[in-house]
Amino acid sequence: MTSTSAAATARATVHGYPRQGPNRELKKAIEGYWKGRVDADALRATAAELRRARWQQLAEAGVHEVPTGDFSYYDHVLDTSVMVGAIPARHREAVAADQLDGYFAMARGTQDVAPLEMTKWFDTNYHYLVPELGPDTVFAADSAQQVAELTEALGLGLAARPVLVGPVTYLLLAKPAPGVAAGFDPLTLLDRLLPVYAEVLGDLRAAGADWVQLDEPALVQDRSPAVLNAAARAYRDLGALPDRPRLLVASYFDRLGEALPVLAKAPVEGLALDFTGAAAGNLEDLAAVGGLPGKRLVAGVVDGRNVWINPLEKSLATLGTLLGLAGRVDVSSSCSLLHVPLDAAVERDIDPQIARWLAFARQKTAEIVTLARGLAQGTGAIAAELAANRADLASRSGSALTHDPAVRARAAAVTDADGRRSQPYAERAAAQRAHLGLPLLPTTTIGSFPQTAELRTARADLRAGRIGTAGYEERIAAEIREVLAFQEKAGIDVLVHGEPERNDMVQYFAERLTGYLATRHGWVQSYGTRYVRPPVLAGDISRPEPMTVRWTTYAQSLTDRPVKGMLTGPVTMLAWSFVRDDQPLGETARQVALALRDEVNDLEAAGSPVIQVDEPALRETLPLRTAARAEYLAWATEAFRLTTAGVRPDTQIHTHMCYAEFGDILQAIDDLDADVISLEAARSHMQAAAELATVGYPREVGPGVYDIHSPRVPDVDEATALLRKGLDALPAERLWVNPDCGLKTRGWPEVRAALENLVAAAREVRESLPGAAS
């Protein structure tokens, strides 16, 4: 096929779309089901209507082929486990009794049964449920959900393409099931899994699928020859099936590298590649392997992870080059649009000129359609769109918001000494112990306490003018008093004020820093029914005035026990925002760190003896390719130290991380030079504590013994067992006792019970230690 005909047939498509609906209808229906207010039929009806609406919205926008199978009640990787029959033994009875309740039990757990482990989806802030596999795993195809959604879309008269997690990525994301030897490699199950995928593909073909997309993002990471050989074998076997749909193998988030020639030679009909950001090198790599002659290329030239308008002329140039490298070129987002909000047009509080710089899912869809039309019909067909795009790009690059001379001068003046504490850790630790006077195995929480309906109502009433500032602040003060009183009664050693004034751990700070934009409707799924509104980091960053000092100081005035000052760290402020793409991330991180440094110093001056700077995103932002990691970790750890290094030796600096694989960043955790780190350990059975001990981490550690992402309340025996497992790795003088994350999403009854059990477990273990006081 010539490049001319490839251009003439160019069409628009996307990998996936936000699931929640314009007003988070899916979240409300699911949570209503959990609480018994919505029955299963009503929940399914809501889901079906949301699917119909999003498909029709895409089709009306000009998308030629809509995705199916990307919708989920909780998580698409969990859906894949259901599709292949990989149900953990402890959940099989529940799934057999009621498939929907069993599904949610796998995701959330029950009081009696633990959920699947949860971790980050590559380097995004989306969380997936980790498959649990072992040598005895028996797979069995269950394509009901995938076939049903395809049938729904086809019934609307739409061209539809089912999207599935590919078999290689599914196995690479899995971990050994409990009780399975740690050395077990789930990839050894590939030959057992492929017939199940073959059956699913056959079912989809029978239901009318012309194309099926198999997502293999795990192949953009550094992979061994054994993994590449497994990928080649998988697509050789699936490609050889006699009666199957055409196969489109997709990757995203980075360049495919050594996996590209493997997939280019595979007997499949198309590849979907990312050509944005770190994946831009796919263009050069594709040319180097001779392109995809006679095959379909779905070109991801619109960034599916960030919210800035696309440089249309640059993307058209990329697409023009790609025309000579494939039999057919279609235009798409770089990845699923799950990672961006739904519609920028509903944001009424953002300056209209700045709003023109933004593209959420609906605007990105329009960009994709425009590019496909320009590719097929020539630039004259989209001349007006190109002119408007040029003007908007120029407006952004010339804005005073994006260039503040004072901020840039301060960042340029930073020296190495600004990022170093005045004393080494051993000396600081002694000063802190004398200052704080804490027992062995001190107890604390991560920061937030339940965000009750009353608190959310108070914020809404303040925004709507139904109450004044004084009335709102009295409500916050009352909540802080209640949180402090509970913690003192429960026996917690280092207290928090509970963060009742904060809507979100990033948004709260973003609303108080120059250079950030906050959205009102920009919800993005983090996990399950947990949605966040990432702020938009649009310009240079500074702190006009203190952000947390008032309420932290008020809390400290209510108790003689130490109260932690609580901040979100610079890397997480970037990772959980839509970050600017017009300068290196390290430069932006330094600006944020300097603003936070001012806050840390003000907290200390106001009397805070302990200050926690959370960096849960340090691991998730780690580049997927090893070659890029050293540069990232250098500026990321520098930013944390720049935030925290200005305090006295006896001020204790904590940090917090959660739900990530920490093995790749153990040296970086040490390089942060924090005095105490708390991290997730309940679902991973103290794996993080063992990893830190293995590398000789010398500082204090709080591995979580209460999994807050589940409604389960761990009893004293369970918390005690986890704590003793932590003591197998770390000495008692360096071990803290805490939940594995903040408590904002939990309800007060379970929080009270869980924290009381946590304190009782700490007391029981403390009293059993050699030399413990009677």
Image (tube, grey):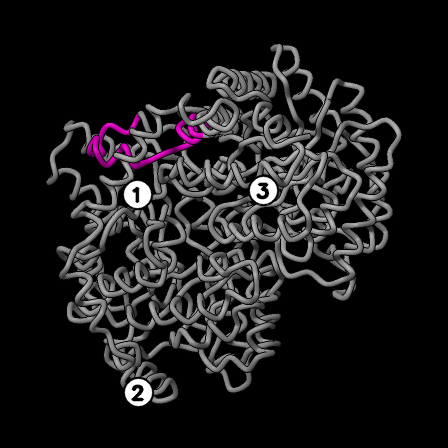
**On screen, 77 above or below 12?**
below
Q: Residue at x 45, y 61 (%)?
A: 618
**CA–CA distance in space, label 3 to label 2:** 44 Å
- How many labels were placed on the picture? 3
Q: Quadrant of residue 206?
A: top right
Of the pair 522 and 489, the residue shown nearer to us: 522
- Magenta run includes residue 356: yes
Q: Which residue is mark 3?
A: 108
Under mark 3, the amino acid is Arg
Whether residue 525 is visible, yes or no, is no
**Residue 705, percent from left and from top:** 53, 61
Q: Residue at x 25, y 42 (%)?
A: 396
- Magenta run includes residue 559: no
Q: Secondary structure at mark 2?
A: loop
User: How many residues crowd mark 1 within 10 Å: few (<14), some (14–19), many (20+)?
Assistant: some
**Residue placed furthest toward the right:** 242
Magenta-colored span: 346-367
Of the pair 743 and 16, the residue shown nearer to us: 16
Q: Which residue is mark 2?
A: 423
Is residue 405 found left or right of 329 in the rendered image? left
User: How many residues crowd mark 2 within 10 Å: few (<14), some (14–19), many (20+)?
Assistant: few
Q: Quadrant of residue 726?
A: bottom right
Whether residue 605 is visible, yes or no, is yes
Which quadrant is home to the N terminus? top right
